[in-house]
Image (tube, rainbow, N blue to C red):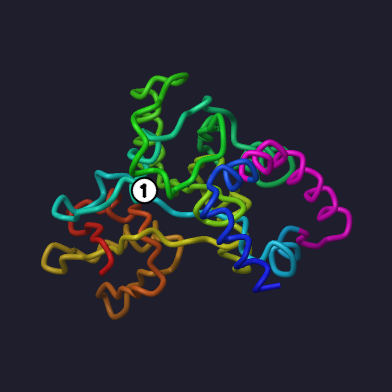
Amino acid sequence: MKLFGSKIDRIIKRIPALGKLLSSLFGISEFYILEFFRRIDKKFNIYTMGILNKYILKGRWGGRVVPLNKNINFDSRFVPSQEILEILARSKVAGISWCYCRSVQRKYGDPNCDHPLYTCIHLSFGKSLYEIPYKSYNLKKVPKRKIIKLLEECDKRGLVHQLIYFPNPQFYYIICNCCPCCCVILNKFLSSGSPQMIKSDFLAKTYLEKCSNCEDCKDWCYFGARTIEDGELQFNSIRCFGCGICVSKCPNNAIILIKKL
């Protein structure tokens, strides 16, 4: 199975159009797939997508974390495929729509999430990160200023920017802004490790001389990379996903994102 999967990856890397087609088909069907499995999960009290991801999909569906450029250290040199606005600038956007995860959570689960529903940025066709550095600006159907405003608002709210991918992390069909209370991918990853989430290419760095140990960054770190022990901040770099939320939430501007070596 692993050999078969590697062959698929080699084929779609050589023929990106095939990967984009598979990504698009999965994206078109995603609503119906998630809703179908949600009903099965409710009836039988299981997590169907987790089972599929473990035995069949094997990490081919999930989320890839990408930060907003304003959270990245200005000295960092990064390629367009590593930052959310650059990715959007090179992706043809079909529009912004409501979030399936939040709508379902409010209808059937905990209704206390106050994040906006219209936070999912749909693409007109599946995209490949292999091609990102070569694409020109292509935001046609949704004004660029509207998307930038949405992303900045989501950043303030502490939402994680993710490329939702299929059939591997290089091919994405939608860009989401996710909260751990509702998001199928983020919530299930934090609770069980499935589906797969890919870290960004950045890591948080804290200037301890500026840190007041206020615990704001700890409270906003969904991945448990920050703790306070004996009144001092402790940082676990292995747990850091480089989402940049801690950067925007730090009142002392003590945190930046740096590119991984």
Q: Is residue 13 left or right of residue 248?
A: right
- Residue farthest left in this picture: 209
Q: Position of residue 184 (x, y in %)?
A: 63, 51
Point 39% across, 56% down: residue? 220
SS type, badge 1: helix
Which residue in the structure is indicated by mark 1? 81
- Asked where in the image residue 234 lies, by quadrant, the reply is bottom left
Taking the magenta stretch, the answer to whether it contains residue 140 is: no
Q: Position of residue 135 (x, y in %)?
A: 37, 36
Point 65% across, 45% down: residue? 22
**Which segment did they paint magenta?**
23-48
Magenta segment, prevailing SS (helix, strand or loop): helix
Taking the magenta stretch, the answer to whether it contains residue 28 is: yes
Between 50 and 158, the one lying in front of the other is 50
- Residue farthest bottom in this picture: 230
Q: Is residue 237 left or right of residue 70?
A: right
